Image (tube, rainbow, N blue to C red):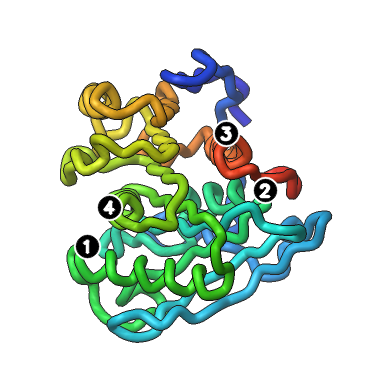
Amino acid sequence: MDHRRSRAVDSRLGGIVHAESGKEPMTSIAGGGMGRDQPGDGRLAASPPRTTRGVVVEGPAGSLEGILDIPGGDPPAVAVFCHPHPLHGGSMHNKVVYRAAKGAVAAGLPTLRFNFRGVGRSAGQHDGGRGEAEDLRAALDFLCERFPASPLLVGGFSFGATVGLGVGVSHEQVAALVGLGLPLSSASFEFLEGETRPLLLIQGEEDPFGSMVALRRLVERLPDSVRLLSFPGEGHFFTGVLSQLAEAVTEFCRLHLNGHDSGAPSA
């Protein structure tokens, strides 16, 4: 492992945070370099006990496959994380989405990952973001039915951040938002201006799809409820700082959603 130090720069809370750099182990590799869960991995079991199971969300274009991770104890909120672009290998098994979701679970939040239409066993075809937004709304309905009155956290990575944040700002039950690897070169996030709910943005400073200059300009126009965490030397996939990314999500959930300790984020 590379034991060089990298710095996570937190522009609103805590200044400079030092973090170990180095590649994270992945349970397996799927097409497009996406990490996948490994069924039966003992690290998914923790105290208090949690359950991880496959679920089906009824979407507007047909059934959507998902994975619902439920930690033990009374949930302070529930979360959903959206995956990157389906036409570039994105799925709910993407390593960034997986680690972010486990970060929410570590704070005690039942957390859903699901495949957009046309991905994996999900019905339908890719719809350029429009249909995927409807898929996410169906996923939020799924969570609201099972966890009524619970606050929601909506997060996403890359294309999933575009969809997740776009839908999240218009949903009254959403209490907090997380955007990872914002693709500012291909999408506008001006809709975040005026958003006062807690918002965590995490970006690699060498991300070719999201300029830090553009992101900082956006953040300057946002309320103080936003937290920007940037990782020098990291690209779009946060290869050397996945553990730190998960820990940042855990901290954010505990701070803004009264999350409790459900163990460290799973590797």
Which residue is located at x 62 percent, y 64 percent?
69
Residue hosting label 2? 106
Q: Nearer the viewer, mark 2 or mark 4?
A: 4
SS for callout 3: helix
Q: Earlier in the sequence, mark 2 or mark 4?
A: 2
Residue with the mark numbered 1: 129
Q: Residue at x 38, y 73 (%)?
A: 138
Which quarter shows the N terminus? top right
> What is the three-letter code of the residue carrying label 4?
Gly
Circle nearer the viewer, 3 or 2: 2
Q: Earlier in the sequence, mark 1 or mark 2?
A: 2
Badge 3 is on which residue? 244
Q: Secondary structure at mark 2?
A: helix
Chain-order first, disc 3 or disc 2? 2
Q: Residue at x 41, y 70 (%)?
A: 115
Q: Nearer the viewer, residue 113 or 200?
A: 200
**What's the CA distance linking mark 1 and mark 3?**
29 Å
Q: Amino acid at mark 1?
A: Gly
- Which mark is first along the chain, 4 or 3? 4
Select label 3 or label 4 by which is in front.
4
Lower sequence index among marks 1 and 3: 1
Q: CA distance from mark 2 to mark 4?
A: 25 Å
6 over 75 or under it: above or below: above
